[in-house]
Image (cartoon, rainbow, N blue to C red):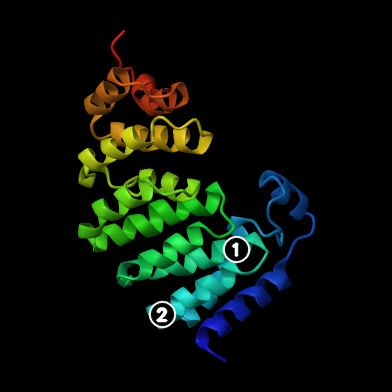
Amino acid sequence: MKRSEQIKSAIIHTFQEHQNKENRPAMEAYMKHQFLFYGIKSPERTPILRPIYKEYRTISETERMDAAILLFQQPERECHYAALGLLEKGVKKAVPSSIAVYKELMMTASWWDTVDMIASNLCGGYFKRYPEQLRPITENWSHSSNLWVRRSSMLHQLKYKEQTDKGLLFETARQLKGEKEFFIEKAIGWALREYSKTDTEAVVQLLESESFRPLTKREGLKWAKNKGLLSS
């Protein structure tokens, strides 16, 4: 059996052993019944997965990617979270082709919970390793026909702070600002709110001088407003 298959099987077996039927209905309802759950919440998942991640810490990046894809083929959402946890363990060793896998997983069983982890943690880490890819891929993804890929294009730099490419961030916001789509409006506001902690004046000027949608403006200006940094 390939090691990628071994990892998948080990994770599924562990989840089956620790499933909690009492938690399942509420977890499935929270995700609007789009996914099945074992009923294992994050505080319980972390310690039971730790020995598996440790056992397979020497896997190649190809094996890591293959295991993640296999886990995303499972119906239970915890398998998808485990796949992303596994990929995060290798993000500093990501190979150039890793971004294609991240995009594939983003478009598989798509919802905000996994997409946002992929965008900010995996893609964000990837572009720090391959900074020359940040602009071309972000520009390409911002024009994607897939809602979740477009949302991701706004969130790649979410944790970059002073390392943020402000020009690219603002260009992407402008590219997407006309969409009447909650998950896009929210993503623009979220990304700009985070960057406002680094350059408040630039974000306020952008949002107050251009025609962003109301939800985006509220989200984007929230931090500055709470800090009393907006002029009356």
Determine if residue 46 is in view.
no
Tell me the distance, in whole angstroms, between the alpha carbons under discs 1 and 2: 24 Å
Which x, y percent locates residue 225?
A: 37, 19
Foreground: 159 or 111? 111
Q: Residue furthest bottom?
A: 1
123 relative to 203, above or below = below
Give the number of the disc on residue 45: 1
Q: Tell whether label 2 touches label 1 (CB within 8 Å).
A: no
First-in-chain label (1 vs 2):
1
Q: Which residue is mark 2?
A: 62
The crowd level at tag 2 (other Cα within 10 Å; few <14, some 14-19, many 20+) is some
The answer to whether residue 205 is left or right of residue 78 is left
Residue in the image at 52% along x and 54% along y: 114
Residue in the image at 53% along x and 89% along y: 2
The answer to whether residue 180 is left or right of residue 35 is left
Q: Quadrant of the N terminus?
A: bottom right
50 relative to 216, above or below = below
The answer to whether residue 206 is left or right of residue 213 is left
The answer to whether residue 43 is left or right of residue 164 is right
Number of labelled discs? 2
Q: Secondary structure at mark 1?
A: helix
- Residue 44 occupies which quadrant of the picture? bottom right
What is the three-letter code of the residue carrying label 2?
Answer: Thr
Residue in the image at 54% along x and 77% along y: 52
- Residue 167 occupies which quadrant of the picture? top left
Which x, y percent locates residue 29?
A: 73, 46
Give the number of the disc on residue 8: none
Given this view, does label 1 or label 2 mark the residue nearer the observer? Answer: 2
